[in-house]
Amino acid sequence: MHIERPSAQQQDYANLASKLLCERYGRSPLAYVHSFGCQQNLSDGEKISGMLAQMGCNFTDSPEKADLVIYNTCAVRENAEDRVLGNVGALKPLKKQRSNMIIGLCGCMMQQQQMADKIKRSYPYVDLVFGTHALLELPQLLYQRLSGQSRQFSTADSDGCIIEGLPLRRDGTIKANLPIMYGCDNFCTYCIVPYVRGRERSRLSSDILAEAQELVAQGYREITLLGQNVNSYGKGLEEQIDFADLLRRINAIEGDFILRFMTSHPKDCTPKLIDAIAECEKVCNHIHLPVQSGSDRVLTMMNRHYTIAQYEALIAYARKKILDVTFSSDIIVGFPGETYEEFQQTLALIKRIGYTALFTFIYSPREGTKAASMEDPVPYAEKSRWMQELLAVQSQIREQQQAQQIGRTLRVLADGEASESGWLSGRTVSNDIVQFAAPKQKLGSFVDVTIERALNWALFGRLSETK
Ligand code: SAH
Ligand code: SF4
Ligand code: F3S
């Protein structure tokens, strides 16, 4: 796999852009970077902010105040794209008031040629457009635009490479995302990701371990390993290593931290991996294992490569091996040709498994994917009713699960302030939200909380003892 690092020429562009930015605004420019979509995209956003920081930018959390606005976009569903376009539209009057503002769009949406063309045609106030394969070009594109050249577009398709050595400006100080691989080769028939993120490629384990060690040394308490299918980590590397081996190596780093990972594709989730999760004390006993549908016929149409029997066998093995393991999943409602009976199979599966969280989506056709040309006779309004039915079932399951937590003492990583003053919020190893009264100094610590009250979205408790 080709590994790229920022070159001397890119560094030169960064220096030139930095100078022009300073001249243009007469001070350090203020940047606003917002990433839509998945954690992988958030992680790219941290690299974009890192490059901007290197070019002398400071940051603001409001686009109204920003000299430079970058939207790092998501193309996974139509409503994700609509949200982005709405936000971009809202920048038009701002740019009218302040013509020296720079607006950039990047990420998955921009990697689709028809979308880049639409921006070119209908959003003339957007200065820079670059796709997922052009992250490294940001300093050059910015420099060219700042030096008076026309609007910059860099959206060429590519299988993708691995970029190491970019500066990072991380969004948090307690939790960190750590990409272990990029791209996707699975081509689930509904999904745009393989088209906009290129081929699946793994980072060298040495680079991942070095980054994990650095995070632990900096005091991060939670590391989430990222990939579209972390279970196929290591394929194509010279080194003989798989995801289970990688987990064990990161788990061996000394320090008080926990490890999560996502996403785990059921077709590649092996007993070896479950054993590693069970044996690694820092790896959380919660697995996000997206099933998508409870019907074997629909799963075949989706190109998912597992059956419900195989999926449930995996869950059974994990329950046997991993103490108190919990599961979450993604579900697509209304895949083309799905019948109400097949949807009922999804409901039945949800009841059998008892997921602690479900991320549910009504099927959204994506141009260029196989499913987009399949017969889709069920009207959207009908699919919405199915969705309501599903949400009601899950809400009942959740209510029972949450009620059972009352009286238990759970280990929680305090990761933010709750809306109620004097209260903090955190997550259990199962990724459940817990709120409790505690001083701010506890932020970033693992605490024990005894649960006194339960709602569907959160548990509330009392600090019992700190570690
Ligand atoms: N790589 C991950 C998923 C990434 S996309 C995996 O395989 O699990 C996150 C979720 O978005 C998917 O799991 C799926 O449930 C949903 N999704 C993707 N494409 C979609 C589409 N076209 N319509 C509706 N939901 C979609
Ligand atoms: Fe999309 Fe499937 Fe790849 Fe996940 S595994 S990103 S759902 S194609
Ligand atoms: Fe969206 Fe791209 Fe992630 S399409 S879900 S931001 S990989």
Image (tube, grey):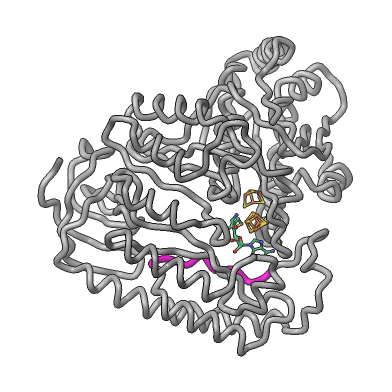
Q: Is residue 247 visible?
A: yes
- Residue drawn at x 37%, y 57% as measured from the top left: 286
Q: Which residues are magenta?
A: 356-363
Is 341 above or below relative to 141? below
Q: Nearer the viewer, residue 71 or 162?
A: 162
Where in the image, quadrant-wise, is ligand 1 located?
Answer: bottom right
Q: Residue furthest front?
A: 240
Residue 434 picture location, percent across and down: 27, 57
Image quadrant containing the C terminus: top left
Is 297 above or below relative to 43? below
Q: Residue furthest left?
A: 465
How many numbered marks are there? 0
Residue 53 picture location, percent across and down: 56, 21
Residue 71 picture location, percent across and down: 65, 41
Image quadrant containing the N terminus: top right
- Residue drawn at x 49%, y 37% as measured from the top left: 178
Is 457 above or below relative to 246? below
- Residue drawn at x 60%, y 48% as measured from the top left: 36
